[in-house]
């Protein structure tokens, strides 16, 4: 996958909209403000679902905003050229998305009171989701088979680097009061409680009908039909026609793709890399 990538500090980035110079500037000079809310993920963890949900919480369930402005402009990616320029111009409290590993994140964040949500997903499902997604992308070296992508993923040879390093890095923040860890699995299993948890963390209050509207408009079906959120606007330039962001939207799909040997390799690796972290962080287990 990294054949077409841009590299910065040993981490590969997609070839479009990223550059080492900008990544350095983002890290050194981007000013995170106390009122900003940051949405952090490893790619394919449900990032866009989280963004859509938080946007809907901000609009009190009114879908007008999510249906009229592209998702990457509502919560721009700080590490991309497009997002960085947009964020510099934005007045007031901002929503900011990022896939950056902790060591490359804007330094100003660590001295700020800005709130961050880190969304984690079973890395096996992240792997399968990534395989199908990157297969249709025009800005990375595409995987030719799941077997090949499996190798790349376990070696950390994929965009934004090793899932294990990414998750470990950000989880070191877990005891900070401006940091909330969520999982894709809890969103799937109990979205109502998850939205309440996000509201509490962000100091937002929703009436029952507003909460219902957040749930309805952030559902898989609603997002799949929303051209401002389903990446259909990027087809042609960034993705092939058959590419889709909202593929299945389920937990445990890896079971349909991993061989017994791959499942064992992955278990062993997970054990090696993550055994010393509190295991209740990994809800899928
Ligand atoms: P699958 O490929 O397993 O279907 P990201 O936004 O980080 O790129 O993650 C994409 C994954 O999140 C895809 O997983 C996609 O289907 C899933 N997803 C996006 N919106 C969702 C929603 N509203 N409900 C459930 N899953 C969603």
Image (tube, grey):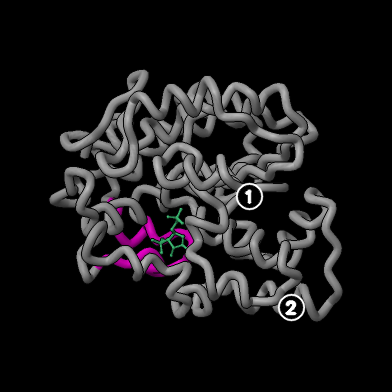
Say which element carries label 1. Answer: strand
What separation in Å lies between label 1 and label 2 (alpha carbons)?
22 Å
Q: Residues within 10 Å of mark 2 (few under 14, many from 20)?
A: some
Q: Nearer the viewer, residue 22 or 168?
A: 22
Q: Which residue is mark 2?
A: 212
The answer to if 197 sits in the magenta stretch is: no
Q: Which labelled disc corresponds to residue 95?
A: 1
**Nearer the camera: disc 1 or disc 2:** 1
Is 29 on the left-hand or right-hand side of 152?
A: right
Q: Residue at x 29, y 48 (%)?
A: 260
- Above or below, 252 relative to 246: above
Is 68 on the left-hand or right-hand side of 211?
A: left
- Above or below, 158 relative to 20: below
* Residue 183 image offset from top left, x and y in percent: 60, 50
Quarter of the figure with residue 199: bottom right
* Residue 226 image offset from top left, x and y in percent: 47, 76
Is 218 on the left-hand or right-hand side of 148?
A: right
């Amino acid at each position: 996958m990294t054949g077409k990538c841009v590299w910065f500090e040993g981490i590969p980035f997609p070839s479009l909209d990223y550059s080492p110079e900008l990544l350095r500037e983002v890290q050194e000079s981007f000013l995170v403000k106390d009122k900003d809310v940051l949405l952090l993920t490893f790619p394919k963890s449900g990032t866009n679902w989280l963004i859509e949900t938080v946007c809907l919480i901000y609009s009190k369930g009114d879908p007008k905003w999510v249906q009229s402005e592209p998702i990457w402009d509502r919560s721009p990616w700080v590490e991309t050229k497009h997002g960085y320029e947009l964020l510099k111009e934005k007045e007031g409290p901002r929503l900011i998305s990022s896939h950056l590993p902790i060591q490359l994140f804007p330094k100003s964040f660590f001295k700020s009171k800005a709130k961050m949500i880190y969304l984690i997903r079973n890395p096996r499902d992240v792997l399968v989701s990534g395989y199908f997604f990157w297969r249709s992308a025009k800005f990375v070296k595409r995987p030719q088979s799941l077997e090949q992508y499996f190798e790349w993923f376990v070696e950390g040879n994929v965009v934004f680097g090793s899932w294990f390093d990414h998750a470990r890095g950000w989880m070191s923040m877990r005891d900070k009061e401006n940091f909330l860890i969520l999982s894709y699995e809890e969103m799937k299993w109990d979205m109502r409680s998850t939205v309440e948890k996000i509201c509490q963390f962000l100091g937002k209050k929703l009436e029952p009908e507003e909460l219902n509207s957040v749930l309805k408009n952030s559902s898989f079906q609603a997002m799949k039909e929303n051209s401002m959120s389903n990446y259909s606007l990027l087809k042609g330039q960034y993705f092939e026609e058959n590419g889709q962001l909202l593929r299945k939207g389920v937990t445990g799909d890896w079971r349909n793709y991993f061989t017994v040997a791959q499942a064992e390799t992955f278990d062993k690796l997970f054990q090696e890399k993550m055994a010393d972290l509190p295991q209740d962080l990994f809800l899928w287990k």
